Amino acid sequence: MITIGCAAYAFALIMFNIANQLADGGISGVTLILRALFHFDPAYSTILINIPLIWIGYHFLGRRSVIYTLYGTIMLAVFLWVWQRVPISIDLHHDLFLAGMAAGITGGAGSGLVYRYGGTTGGTDIVARIFERLRGVPMGQTLLWLDVIVLFASLVYIDIRHMAYTLLCTYVFSRIVNFLLSGTYAAKGVLIVSKESQRIIDEVMDDLERGVSILHGEGGYSHQDRPILYVVVSPSELHDLQMIVSDLDKNAFMTIFDVNEAIGEGFTYSRPARRSIFKRSR
C-alpha cells in the first residue's frame, strides 16, 4: 500500500502539478523549485535532499520509522522517474481549477495511503517529528510553517494566479489525507439511558444482531445506579435502533455521536447473516 500511495503521489506531481505549473509544499515543493530554476530532475533531488534528513532522523526516531521513511522516499523517487518517461498526457484544457482539484485528490489519496500504513515520503515529516520530540512542538504546526515557507519561495517561478490554485490543491490534498486517516469504516456510537434496558438489549441483539455493552452509571440528581447501554451501528442501522428505543421507552435518553472507525465483527470482518429483514410498525 505504501508503494501504491507513492505511485499515486508521484503521478499527481508529474501529471498535474508540473504539467500545469502548480507548486507544492514540503520537500516536494523544494524539488519543484530546483526543477524550475536549475532543471534538476525531481527524482534525483528527492533522494539527495532526503539523505541527510534520514541520517539525522535515524538518531532521533528509531530504526523502524527510518526504514519505512527510506522505503517511501525511494519509491517516490522511482515513480517520479518513471512517470516523467511514460508517454501519458492528461489534457485539462488549461483549466487550473480542474488541475488543482485533480492534483489535490490524487496526491492526497496517495499520501493518505502512505501515512495510513505507517510510512512517510521523508522530507519535512522527519523535521516535524524531530521538533515534536525535542521541543514538544506539534507536528501539524511545524508542517504548516514549513509548507508556508516553501510555498512563499515558490513565487520565484510561478505567479499569483498559479499560487492561488496551488492553495486550492493544498486544501483538497489535506482534506483527502484527513479523510483516509480518519478511518475506512465510519459508524455511529449510541449511549442509551432507559428504564427498559433489558428489553432494548434483547431487541437490539435479536433484530439488529449488534452487541450491546452495559456501562454502570449514576444519576447526578437522584444518585441512583442505572445502566447505560453502549451500541455501535452502521449509519444505515441508526434509524432502526431509534425505532426500537422509541417503541420500548418513549422517555429514553439517547446520545448519538460519530465513530471515525469501527474494527471488529460486523464492521471490518463478516458477521452472521440476519435471519430476517427488520420491519417494525409503530
Image (tube, rainbow, N blue to C red):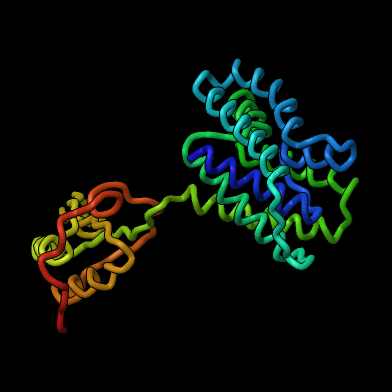
User: Is residue 109 toward the left or the right of residue 42 in the image?
Assistant: left
Out of 62 and 105, give the one closest to the viewer. Answer: 105
What residue is rendered at 70% in x and 50% in y? Answer: 87
**Residue 98, placed above or below residue 67:** below
User: Is residue 184 toward the left or the right of residue 85 in the image?
Assistant: left
What residue is rendered at 67% in x and 34% in y? Answer: 77
Out of 217 and 83, give the one closest to the viewer. Answer: 83
User: Is residue 180 toward the left or the right of residue 229 in the image?
Assistant: right
Where residue 14 appears, as percent x and y from the top left, is 72, 47
Q: Residue 69's quadrant in the figure? A: top right
Where residue 119 appears, as percent x and y from the top left, is 53, 34
Q: Is residue 195 visible?
A: no
Where residue 273 appears, as percent x and y from the top left, is 15, 60
Q: How many marks?
A: 0
**Residue 26, placed above or below residue 45:** below
Q: Residue 146's quadrant in the figure? A: top right
**Residue 83, placed above or below residue 192:** above
Where residue 36 appears, as percent x and y from the top left, is 86, 43
Instruction: Give the residue furthest to the bottom.
Output: 282
Q: Is residue 255 visible?
A: yes
User: Is residue 63 toward the left or the right of residue 140 in the image?
Assistant: left
What residue is rendered at 58% in x and 32% in y? Answer: 72
Q: Which quarter shows the C terminus?
A: bottom left
Q: Residue 159's quadrant in the figure? A: bottom right
